[in-house]
Image (tube, rainbow, N blue to C red):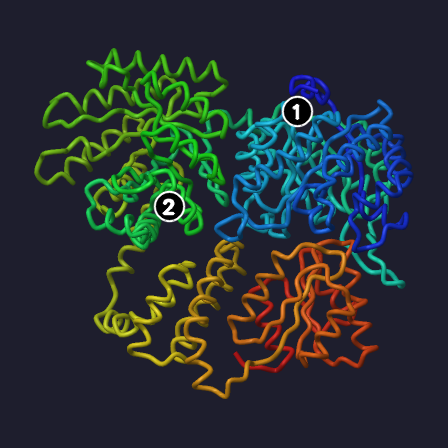
Amino acid sequence: MTKQEFREFYQNKLIYLDGATGSNLQKAGMPTGVCPEQWILEHPDAILELQRAFVEAGTNILYAPTFTANRIKLAEYGLAEHLIDMNTELVRLAKQAAGGKALVAGDITMTGRQLTPMGDMDFEQLIDVYKEQIRVLDQAGVDLLVVETMMSLQETRAALIAAKEVSSLPVIASLTFESDNKTLFGTDPMTAMLVLQALGADVVGTNCSTGPDQMCGVVRQMKQVAKIPVLAKPNAGLPKLDSEGRTVYEMDAETFGREMCLLVEAGATFLGGCCGTTVKHIRSMVEKTGAMKLPETTDAAQNKGIRYLTSERKTLAFGLDDRFHIVGERINPTGKKKFQACIRDNDFSMVEEFVTQQEESGASILDINMGMSGIDEKETLLKVMEDVSMQTSLPLCIDSSHVDVQEYVLRHYPGRALINSISMESAKMEPLLQIAKKYGAMFILLPVSDEGLPKDLDEKKEIIQKILRRALELGFTKEDIVVDGLVATVGANKNAALETLETIRYCKEQGLATICGLSNISFGLPERSYINAAFLTMAIANGLTMAIANPNQELLTSCMLASDLLLHKQDADLSYIEVMNERKQRTAKTVEQEASAAEKSVLQKVYECVLKGNKTKIVDQVHEALKEHEAQQILNEALLPAINEVGDLFDKGIYFLPQLIASAEAMKTAIEDIQPLLLAASDGKPKATIVIATVEGDIHDIGKNLVALMLKNYGFRVIDLGKDVPKEVIIETAKKEHADIIALSALMTTTMQQMKHVIEYAKEQGVTAKVLIGGAVITQEYADEIGADGYSKDAAEAVKVAKQVLGLRD
């Protein structure tokens, strides 16, 4: 099926997907702990009966049962070499069940391994894993692809890029969101939609995690910016255990169907069911929503004229008449000898300083440039991009004059970036436009040709129009483009400012956003800051959208804020007052406070390394601190307070999984370094022993690994048994190691019941260790129901709960 045929297929109607596979197959006899795909192949009648019933209930698209049939997942069962045969036969079964009455989607999901820099999986390696499975699914004859139950936007991008490079099939992308309407990695629904639709997804949506009513907020946020259909595939409510210890979902089919109407009203047009939904649920959904009318226009159409840049965790939306934005220019080695020396020594501490300073000073976007000699620009810029993306949620502007460098970094960037820049140079224009289109980026249009700078204003306008026409031919819109006003120095060309202002006015009349390198205007003149500030206010008044500048210059940012206020831009008055008050507070520090800060500076540097997840620098800072402080003091006054602060930031939704992992790893590095000193100063005994494992049948361990790391950082002796661990192994280890706590993790509703079995078996064996449980599908109510001693919603809370159940003080 082509993408155009797919668009015709779903045009002006609701599309119905299938219901749950795993929970229904368990009812049909599939045990936990087995490879689901292998069990299906050994019991084909079970999947045929289920999927035929879904089709009869009204399903338009069946998901082939290939969910975890990728190389990495199959390898955990020793089945990787059977990938081709298994995927091919599973698709054949789905097509047989569809019987020509429904489309069949090849189903793929996460691999369970984390991408660098948090894990050990290289991005290109992940793309290759997805390519391998997608090729087989395509050759097996699926009509489209679905990438579902994704917790990471970056992994979803990898799957989409893989699909784009080896297949022409339509692709649906579906993520799972937590109760705060963010993914585990901190991506909100709007950002997910913007990034994935720009990358070429044909449908984007959400599945799993919640029931229909709780999913409405996610769908509404996606619909605000969607140019493509929105998918909703909720669970049948939240899971519970029945009297026999089985996982069940309490939402009946009638209620499910009725609540699916809310999702249609919120904007979803692709509808289905996830965990716990049966054939009855799908039939009820079809019956209840079948007569509903679709919205005539999309919210995205109503938002025409709005531009969107994103990081992995944040969206910047702006129009031509909105408040002015600064693109921070500091992460650029040009003219910075000290910065260049640090980069050559693989020391990125100044990058981190520039990020913090520019964000605090009001930058909306950060430009990153590594154009200097003596380094591999491609790898260095990638490293900087990854580090900056971990430290801030601001969108990035990728700045390089080399086509291959731009593609390399854009391919890895986990958001929607701004390319700096695309000119009319024949060797670069077409390749860069194709790259921008492939990766869904916006770009700065630089009005320069093979002949160099334009001779006059007319030639500048002509170049702008030529690049614009080609971009529109390739499918870009005017909202994807920001034109560089091309500022020359007024010292050499007395009309430089006037010509740039005319360019800005011209572009705004054409419906184009504009940007300029602000400091160029004053080059070679004394007291440049006054010229820059005056020019900025004139440019903003003429419609300039953003400028590449140093946001640390207070005169510049003050003029920007004042200009927005005087032009009566939305909330500009409040922003002006807020920033000015903050500046007063910053300058009101007393001498005593500054002296106190100086005394704590060594420990403060260790603290900040943990807070910022600076794994490479923390050992040096710890060694400096050891010259003045005991190891225990460093632990108590720097490391532990810092990781506590990280936990608080995580709880408040300011930090997300990437920052939490980075900070925990930095602390682990520091503790490993001072561990001998800590043991020498104590009795050598850890606080307590904890045995931790992901329960039998569950092969997810991201959260469990982080909990283990955090517990180790707090001095607990942690024995990590890994994933898919039988209850007998857990309890035997707990007895052997005299465990004080048994910590259990489960991500899937189909495996959470194993926690109850572990608790029951522990009692049978006379094990008195406290049992803590956690995981994406686990709740306090469930913990109480099965008799667990504690429940933790995340890694940061796990430490607090462990201390509480053992009666330990902080």
Q: Which element type, helix, strand or loop, lies under badge 1? A: loop
Left or right relative to 491: residue 634: right
Q: Is residue 806 above or below residue 220?
A: below
Which label sits on residue 384? 2
Left or right relative to 627: residue 408: right
Q: Marks 2/1: CA distance?
A: 34 Å
Q: Is residue 407 above or below residue 79?
A: above
Name the residue rendered at 76%, 43% in the picture. Answer: 274
Left or right relative to 391: residue 90: right
Q: Which residue is mark 1?
A: 169
Name the residue rendered at 59%, 39% in the picture. Answer: 156
Q: Looking at the image, which is closer to me, 696 or 796? A: 696
* Residue type for callout 1: Leu
Residue 775 position, x and y percent, is: 67, 59
Residue 147, by quadrant, is top right
Q: Is residue 386 above or below residue 659?
A: above
Residue 299, by quadrant, is top right
Mark closest to the chain's N terminus, 2 or 1: 1
Q: Mark 2–mark 1 contact, CB under 8 Å?
A: no
Left or right relative to 735: residue 585: left
Q: Residues within 10 Å of mark 1 (few under 14, many from 20)?
A: many
Q: Which element type, helix, strand or loop, lies under badge 2? A: helix
Q: Residue furthest front?
A: 81
Residue 122 position, x and y percent, is: 52, 45
Residue 529 position, x and y percent, is: 16, 40
* Residue type for callout 2: Val
Q: Looking at the image, which is closer to me, 751 or 427? A: 427
Residue 77 position, x and y percent, is: 74, 50
